[in-house]
Amino acid sequence: MSTYRTDGIQADSPGSKRLWNKEYLKVMACNFLLFFAFYLLTPLLPLYLDEQFHTDKDTIGLVLSGYVVATLLIRPFSGFVVDTFDRKRVLTLCFFVFFICFAGYIGAGTLLMFAIVRTLHGIPFGATTVVNSTAAIDVLPSERRSEGIGYYGLSNNLAMAIAPSAGIYVYHSTGNFMLLFWISLVLALAGFACSTSVRLPRRQKVAGKPKLSLDHFFLGRAWLLAVNICFFGLCWGVMSNYVAIYGKEQLGITDGTGIFFMLLSGGLVVSRLFGSKSLRKGKLTHNAVVGVILSLAGYSMFAFIVTPWSYYMSALLIGLGNGQMYPAFLNMFIKIARHDQRGTANSSILISWDLGMGIGILFGGFIAECIGFAAAFHVVAVMQAAGTLLFLVATRNFFEARRLNEN
């Protein structure tokens, strides 16, 4: 039987097994709008910096990595805040600041101002992704939580499937970057409005919980999982930020980046749909193994076979791989954490992913400037291979030895 707070919000009910409840759908809609607004711009920002400010490649990497640095700095505190304060208030506040930051792109008239805005934008982006994904876990029935976490990722995968293609289409049709900034601003406003309607269950206080400890900021029990996901974040950071310039310089593809991201995200969506059934059965390491191997095949094809067909086929393989791998890793983080550490578990995997992305964006631009983009993607293939080997040899056994049964 369901229980309610004094304000009418339904609390967690052990007997309720409804996956697609109203609050879960709202949280997914918030996540979709968050990522759509963000990824509408992401693949085009290197081109914007090049055309608007005539920036060289390593400076582009430095500017674009700024938001990752800010995101990394805020993630640990996000987990602590989400696990300590009212999540509804934290969610709406973070989403509002995320929305406001898009106005900064419109007003940034110099490279320095743009770099400042981009860096500051990482703060609300990092915080909002943590609190929103934690809210999704809260509104899911415990019996279907692993499955629901897998489906939750569809919202940002669909955004990533549509947003880059839509952004590239708008840019090629109008040549107007300002229009893209305004569209992102409006979409972020819609996401904020949606977040205000989300109703979250009351959380029980944990008796004997330490007031302040390292695990409030990072899930130390999952340290090897964190190291492993960092490898994969590095590969994603290079690929997602430099694929447009690489396709233009190496293959002469100017209008195909949208197709690349559609195939990439199509693979993510298909993989999430099929992978969620395995997650429901508890096959976390199985999904992760399939995911890292598929991703390795995709990154290797991208790096070492330089043809249009391999360019597009690699996008599909990388999408299929990450769609299996990331939800499995997220579930592993949550399974290692106590139920009162959901925010910390979410922030920990995102810290690790973003750290890898930041390194990838920064050093990808540096390598591309010194040697070329081909060399940068060769490094990506090697790093994916290293991450795959680490998981197969050590990380999956590390998880099985540390998993808890309370989640």
Image (cartoon, rainbow, N blue to C red):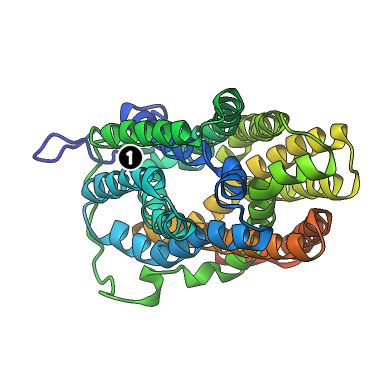
Q: Quadrant of residue 376?
A: bottom right
Residue 101 % position (x, y): 35, 48
Q: Is residue 347 visible?
A: yes
Q: In the shown orientation, is residue 199 left or right of residue 323?
A: left
Residue 187 % position (x, y): 38, 31
The structure residue drawn at horizontal position 21% and vertical position 48%, both measured from the top left corner, is: 89
Residue 321 % position (x, y): 71, 43
Q: Is residue 1 visible?
A: no
The structure residue drawn at horizontal position 34% and vertical position 34%, both measured from the top left corner, is: 191
Task: Judge by depth and name the residue closer to the eye, 247 or 268.
Answer: 247
Q: Amino acid at mark 1?
A: Pro
Q: Quadrant of residue 161?
A: top right
Q: Quadrant of residue 375?
A: bottom right
Placement of 206 over or under 307, stated as above or below: below
Residue 135 % position (x, y): 34, 44
Classify the position of the N terminus by image quarter: top left
Residue carrying label 1: 14
What number of labels is visible? 1
Task: Judge by depth and name the residue closer to the eye, 226 or 108.
Answer: 108
Q: Residue furthest top?
A: 173
Placement of 198 over or under 93, stated as above or below: above
User: How busy is the neighbourhood of tag 1: few (under 14 within 10 Å), some, or many (20 plus)?
Assistant: few
Task: Judge by depth and name the residue closer to the eye, 64 or 93.
Answer: 64
The structure residue drawn at horizontal position 91% and vertical position 44%, both measured from the top left corner, is: 305
Numbered disc 1: secondary structure? loop
Q: In the shown orientation, is residue 7 left or right of residue 81?
A: left
